[in-house]
Image (cartoon, rainbow, N blue to C red):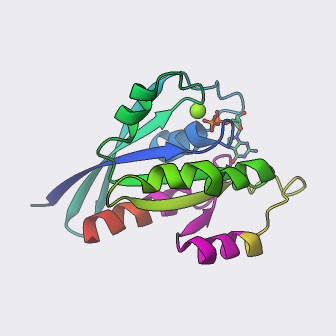
Amino acid sequence: MSEKFGFKVIITGDTAVGKTSLVRRYCDNKFDANQKPSIGADFTIKVVHFAKYEVILTIWDIGGQVLFDNLRDFYYQGSDAGIIVFDVTNQDSLKRISAKWLPEMQSINNISIIILANKIDLKQDRIIGPEECQQLSNDLGIPVFETSAKTGINVKKAFEVLAKSLVER
Ligand code: GDP
Ligand code: MG
């Protein structure tokens, strides 16, 4: 018999950094170059197995245009883990991690956080390199994974490291 765990995971970050695309890549192994902007909040369930564990992740993906504070509170409420995404071709999306997304997320008790540096397939346009990602991880003390929802690189790994850390804590 496997031991079952359920966790709520929220994914945040600036608009168009690839949040919905990363969830789709992880849950359905699909990518859409014309991914439509998300409206409101939606969740996807993913079941992960490792060792003797069955881990059920409820992954909440919220749209950029959150008009109601109570929806935001509901979204954050009871989260076990948070994934913050930025786009390695967009400096502002990185700045907003320290300015907004991280402090907001750290207001939740006992939350495990990882950061995804997404769109690394865009080699020509990339302005935030691997050294800067490593530096960010060191400065914040938070794991940073370099990902691409387009190619899928590191996406499964990031979610599974997170799931594992949730079971182990
Ligand atoms: P969200 O607003 O953060 O949910 O971002 P979306 O998932 O809607 O993605 C915004 C746009 O970026 C869409 O056109 C996606 O196809 C594109 N996109 C997302 N992830 C990647 C990636 O890893 N590489 C590339 N090249 N494009 C991506
Ligand atoms: Mg979205």
**Location of the N terminus (image quadrant):** bottom left
> In the image, 137: left or right of 87?
left
Looking at this view, name the residue that lies furthest to the right.
Answer: 124
Q: Residue at x 48, y 36 (%)?
A: 61
Membership of 139 in magenta stretch: yes
For this rendering, which residue is in front, 31 or 130?
130
Q: Residue at x 63, y 57 (%)?
A: 98
Q: Is residue 1 above or below residue 72?
A: below
Q: Return the x and y of residue 123 as percentages of the image width and height.
A: 84, 57
Ligand 1 image-quadrant field: top right
**Location of the C terminus (image quadrant):** bottom left
- The count of marks equals 0
> In the image, 35: left or right of 83?
right
Q: Is residue 150 visible?
A: yes
Q: Return the x and y of residue 88 as percentages of the image width and height.
A: 76, 55
Membership of 137 in magenta stretch: yes
Q: Residue at x 72, y 48 (%)?
A: 93
For this rendering, which residue is in front, 68 or 135?
68
> In the image, 23: left or right of 86?
left
User: Hey, which quadrant is residue 53 in on the image?
Assistant: bottom left
Q: Return the x and y of residue 119 as percentages of the image width and height.
A: 72, 51
Q: Is residue 85 above or below residue 52?
A: above
Looking at this view, name the residue that lies furthest to the left.
Answer: 1
Q: Residue at x 67, y 75 (%)?
A: 134
> In the image, 156: left or right of 139?
left
Q: Is residue 90 above or below residue 141?
A: above
Q: Return the x and y of residue 73 as percentages of the image width and height.
A: 38, 35
* Region of the chain picked out in magenta, as a range: 133-159
Q: Is residue 29 visible?
A: no
